[in-house]
Image: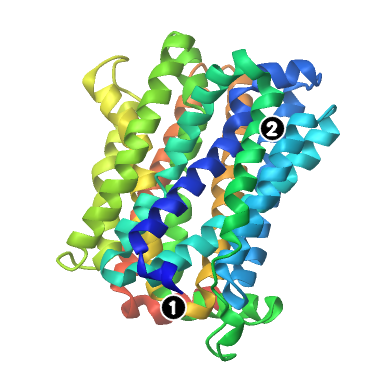
Amino acid sequence: MRWKQSPQAMLIALLVIHVIAHIDRNMLLGFSPQITQDLAISNAQYGFLAGAVWVLSFGFMAVFLGSLADRFSRTRVIAAGILIWSVCTAASGAAQSFGQMVAARFFVASGEAALVPAAVSLLMELFKARRAGTAVGVFFMGIPIGLGLAFVLAGVLGSHIGWRGSFYALGVMGVVIGVPALLLKDDRAQLGETDRGAPFGQQLRNVFGLLRGNATVACTVLGFVLVHLAFVGVAFAQLWLVRERGLDAAAMAQKIGLIGIVFGVLGSVVGGVLSDRLARRLPGGHAGFVVLLILVCGPLMVAYRFADAGSALFYIGMCAGFFLPLATYGPSLALIQGLTPDAMRSTVTGMTMLLINVFAIAIGNLVVGGLSDRMSAAGEGHALTYVLLATDLLVLVAAVFYALAARGPRVAAALQGVVAH
């Protein structure tokens, strides 16, 4: 398998694929005014389309497809995922109703769920422990780059070929990439039964057994989920800044977009590179590094809620909110993967993505929206401020779980008792 002899080339290829995946994912947001108008979609339907449809499909399919990648072929699973999400991206452009768009986006999410679990496992094999954090961090640059490019392309392509033509073009581009990817060989079926993933049901039991039996992995996963509550603050940033801080919507949209791209990319790269360089020097290794990240960025995120709009502290805190969650990807996944048997790595990553999408993204956004609505109805003028401050404080709580992960065996017995019940 000569392609494995060029890990840097494989990393670049996976980054490009990840960028395309997030362009396809977020193009719906970039064209939201045109799509909702043409398909007569209500705000509630749009929220369901952009949120619940994606979370339910992506989260659960990540576990299943991760188990297939562990058992059969990571490259074939990635290639199949590219083809599925690309064909269904093109189908999104052909949708004539809300129901058709829901079906298309459901399978776009299902296809994209194949990428992260298999790709992270591949990167761990290609780059080994000393550079794994850097490789994973670079790979997750795809999130902010893809999100930013989705809005840029929507603005550029929309005036020339419209939203339907843009979806068609993205679908064709994905198929062109996905077909050659099928030729990369990574046949895990040739390995012995102990060296490849178990059938799906047994694989799930193996993963739950790992979480019960390894305190470091369990605490890292819990901390990683809590850190993602920072994305709830990002999701509600525009509403909060306009409604409760009195800032101009158009101006803040541009600033949020620019800050998101720049500091999301910086977080991915800096978090990955520094974690690899400092993990061997800091107590607790990668987990200790994430504790340090949270203790630096978390207070700035809290201060941002109270700082004068436009002040240096205001923008520093906003930047920290974009920087922190992306900076934790490299060290967190390197730590989790490093303590996971090779035969379970894709499945464990899929399970982590499921927990993040369900508890941090779906439930987190739902709770923040519901609580702020209730408080506003009761006459509270700063409802979003207080609720978002609570999510910032929960991000700080993540440091506790990473600190427990850093202690490892010292808390294993206690955690095993808690998880068992």
In the displayed structure, 237 sits above or below 282; it is: above
Quickly name the residue at label 1: 214
Q: Amino acid at mark 2?
A: Tyr
108 or 90, nearer to the observer? 90
- Which of the 4 image quadrants contains residue 25? top right
Which one is in front in this view, the residue at disc 1 or the one at disc 2? 2
| Residue 298 visible, this angle | no
Kindly identify the residue that appears in the image at 65 percent across and 19 percent down.
161
Check disc 2 and report its element: helix, strand or loop.
helix
User: Is 45 left, or right, of 260 in this rendering?
Assistant: right
Image position, residue 392 (x, y; %): 40, 39
Q: Which mark is residue 168?
A: 2
Q: On the rendered image, what quadrant is the C terminus found in?
A: bottom right
In the displayed structure, 266 sits above or below 160; it is: below
Image position, residue 38 (x, y; %): 78, 17
- Which of the 4 image quadrants contains residue 125? bottom left
Kindly identify the residue that appears in the image at 57 percent across and 80 percent down.
188
Image position, residue 172 (x, y; %): 65, 39
Kindly identify the residue that appears in the image at 26 percent across and 28 percent down.
316
CA neighbours of label 1 inside 10 A, class few (<14), some (14 to 19), many (20+): many
The colour scheme applied to this rendered structure is: rainbow
Kindly identify the residue that appears in the image at 62 percent across and 76 percent down.
72
User: Is 283 left, or right, of 124 in this rendering?
Assistant: left
- Which of the 4 image quadrants contains residue 368? top right
Q: Amino acid at mark 1?
A: Asn
